[in-house]
Image (tube, rainbow, N blue to C red):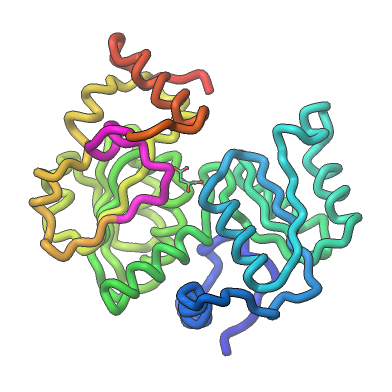
Amino acid sequence: MPQRFRHMLGIEPLSAEQIAFLLDQSKSFQDIQRHPLKKLATLRGKTVALAFFEPSTRTRISFATAAARLGADTMNLQAEVSSLRKGESLLDTVRTLDAMKPDCIVMRHSASGAPEFVAGQLEIPVINAGDGTHEHPTQALLDALTIRDRKSALMGLNVTILGDILHSRVARSNLHLLGKFGCRFTLCGPAMWLPRELECLGYPVRRVARVEEALEAADVIIVLRVQQERLHEPALPLEEYILLYQLTPKRLGLARPDALVLHPGPMIRGLEIAGRAHGPAVPAHRNTFGRFRGRRRCCTLRTGA
Ligand code: MLT
């Protein structure tokens, strides 16, 4: 068994052996999802605190479901209706949660490094559910499991990452994870969203301007959402983004027939990926679209968020 770790703050410090161990461990839990009775007693008597200081659908519900299915209770911090709104500090908020004796905290925050800071202050394990533009380790583990299931191995794949890479914690965690298994990366997107620093991580990374070139020979294509809430760069014409970088069926036809396409969600149809949103959107989603749509005429992705 590889060396154990107390927190899950990022993929970067993990070894390939530790990652493979986690992926192997998850297999039996994957099977349980298919059983009519999905409940286990693995975490019976334990309490998991879910502290999400940023919006989330998939990650929060996945953790809540995982805790319930493993027999744990959950405590839910709803940041938008908590005392944070009254000016309470992050540390005081998590100390309040800690006083109720959870066994672990799952935390998402807009500030890179916030989970690491909290891990240094509390005695219990902290799981990073996404911190700023830094890491989203559990998303990368999930992506790796999906890739391994579909491609049978992670070793040596050609991985294309498309879109807003600069602001994406998903991109960083995936680079660290898949890079440890010898994958080769092609990054494609507007030049200002392709940080050079990613070429210095020690993995084979190339930056490509044309999406058509980036898709050729890709085994895995990871499409990213434009992180509106983190944009600070000069405005980018929206039509230009769609024209140059949107993943369309025609462009996908350039990739290998067995190429696997992943998107961490939330997926903005009509922007990073072709298609239209169907059905009633949740308010935040609609606002996001509204903001893009509203700005369409002046053709900008600039945001003050
Ligand atoms: C994240 O929290 O980083 C998401 O899974 C991806 C996104 O928000 O675009």
Pinpoint residue 152: horizontal percent, then vertical percent.
29, 79
Of residue 192 and residue 144, the one placed in the foreground of this image is 144
Magenta stretch secondary structure, dominant: loop
Residue farthest right in this picture: 99
Q: Quadrant of residue 92?
A: top right
Of residue 31 and residue 138, the one placed in the foreground of this image is 31
**Residue 6: within the magenta?**
no
Residue 92 versus residue 204 in the image, above or below = above
Residue 216 versus residue 12 in the image, above or below = above
Pinpoint residue 112: horizontal percent, then vertical percent.
60, 44
Of residue 138 and residue 115, the one placed in the foreground of this image is 138
Q: In this picture, which residue range is highlighted in magenta?
A: 262-277
For image coordinates 28% across by 10% down, the residue present is 297
Pinpoint residue 111: horizontal percent, then vertical percent.
63, 40
Pinpoint residue 231: horizontal percent, then vertical percent.
45, 28
Residue farthest front in this picture: 36
Residue farthest top in this picture: 298
Asked if residue 248 lies left or right of residue 9, the reply is: left
For image coordinates 89% across by 56% down, the residue present is 100
Q: How many marks?
A: 0
**Residue 274: within the magenta?**
yes
Q: Would you say residue 119 is visible in this rendering?
A: yes
Residue 46 versus residue 255 in the image, above or below = below
For image coordinates 56% across by 50% down, the residue present is 130
